[in-house]
């Protein structure tokens, strides 16, 4: 069976299909799409668990790309999540050991409302938005993923950062029993990332809890992760357990491990090569041909103003 074309059909119809499923015409639409759906389900890597629970009451959010979403199969089986190993298929094979319930996030540092916040409370009363964002890895590949989440800035403001809060630091769970990749010191665990406060508050920054209308698969950073679409993928930290508001610029894991290769800002910049390869082009997962990489991953109109006056070659 020619899977490529039917796979594309399945993905391009994915949004409309969900509408159909909700409507009275569900039975007919389901029939019409049956072959494509079957193909979509064809395994590439064996998933640790099936697609997550469907999320209810998701509204379309702003800034969505109109590009074709990457097939779910690829987005959930070609991953970087070193806590489960360094191969692309390690996370989808091994992340089943991560327990995502119950889950809390510690709020610390320069805030008037610190505390340990259960995930349910973090989400309570908030509208889940779907935003189709490009994610561009520093390794020169990219995907287009329909994320589901809440604006990071809105979530952060609720904790009332003080005027001293200049940066926000995020930390991933540390538990080598659940995250076997942490038994090897490929990075200084736990994984840490950071944003300047204005970057964190920018309306593009998303705290994601789902993708493709469903709860995040473990390998994609369940139960809660960042998505910062104008920065290289490593800034989009997964499985967050701590958010700390700081006066000083946080030391992010990749900067610590290889400072000459990975900076703090990590804004997607086709003009600044990685020391070992070019950043001028990228391969969209599923495509054969490479395409040019866009400044700020195509989000320059929204975010270039944050960096006015900065030398982004020096502060890479
Ligand atoms: N905790 C943690 N977060 C992480 C990583 C990681 O290894 N550990 N990898 C990063 C990198 S390099 C990329 S490209 C993205 C990949 O996200 P995805 O697998 O959902 O596409 O996650 C980022 N977040
Ligand atoms: Mo990445």
Image: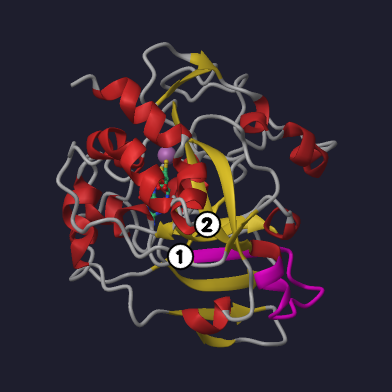
Q: Is residue 133 above or below residue 114?
A: above
* Left or right of 304 on screen, residue 289: left
* Left or right of 101 on screen, residue 49: left
Q: Does residue 169 appear anywhere in the picture?
A: yes
The magenta region covers: 154-170
Magenta segment: does it hold 224?
Answer: no
Q: Which mark is residue 111?
A: none
Which residue occupies 56% across, 88% down? 115
Question: Which marked residue is nearer to the observer: mark 2 or mark 1?
Answer: 1
State the SS at label 2.
strand
State the SS at label 1.
loop
Spot occupied by residue 192 in the image (x, y as percentages of width and height): 46, 60
Q: Is residue 245 above or below residue 283?
A: below
What is the crowding at mark 1: few (fewer than 14 residues within 10 Å), some, or many (at least 20)?
A: some
Q: Is residue 163 above or below residue 51?
A: below
Which residue occupies 19% across, 66% down? 97
* Left or right of 46 on screen, residue 104: right
Mark 2 to mark 1 CA distance (whole Å)? 9 Å
Spot occupied by residue 309 in the image (x, y as percentages of width and height): 85, 36
Say which residue label 1 marks.
Answer: 55
Decide which of tag 2 and tag 1 comes sooner along the chain.
1
């Amino acid at each position: 069976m020619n899977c490529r074309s039917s796979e594309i059909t399945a993905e391009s119809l994915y949004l409309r299909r969900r509408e159909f499923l909700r409507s009275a015409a569900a039975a007919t639409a389901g029939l019409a799409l049956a072959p494509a759906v079957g193909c979509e389900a064809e395994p590439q890597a064996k998933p640790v668990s099936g697609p997550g629970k469907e999320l209810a009451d998701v509204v379309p959010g702003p800034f969505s790309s109109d590009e074709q979403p990457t097939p779910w199969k690829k987005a959930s089986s070609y991953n970087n999540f070193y806590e489960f190993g360094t191969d692309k298929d390690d996370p989808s094979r091994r992340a089943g050991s991560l327990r995502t319930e119950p889950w809390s996030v510690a709020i610390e540092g320069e805030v008037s409302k610190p505390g340990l916040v259960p995930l349910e409370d973090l989400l309570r009363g908030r509208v889940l938005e779907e935003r189709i964002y490009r994610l561009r890895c520093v390794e020169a590949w990219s995907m287009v993923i329909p994320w589901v989440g809440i604006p990071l800035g809105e979530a952060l403001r609720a904790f009332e950062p003080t005027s001293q809060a200049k940066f926000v630091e995020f930390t991933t769970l540390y538990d080598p029993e659940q995250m076997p990749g942490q038994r090897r010191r490929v990075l200084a665990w736990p994984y840490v990332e950071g944003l300047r406060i204005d970057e964190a508050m920018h309306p593009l920054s998303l705290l994601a809890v789902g993708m493709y209308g469903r709860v995040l698969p473990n390998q994609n950073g369940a139960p809660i992760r960042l998505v910062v679409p104008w920065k290289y993928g490593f800034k989009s930290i997964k499985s967050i357990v701590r958010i700390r508001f700081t006066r000083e610029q946080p030391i992010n894991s990749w900067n610590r491990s290889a400072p000459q290769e990975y900076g703090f800002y990590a804004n997607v910049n086709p003009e600044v090569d990685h020391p070992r390869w070019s950043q001028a082009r990228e391969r969209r997962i599923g495509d054969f041909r490479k395409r040019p990489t866009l400044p700020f991953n195509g989000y320059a109109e929204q975010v270039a103003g944050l960096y006015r006056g900065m030398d982004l070659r020096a502060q890479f």
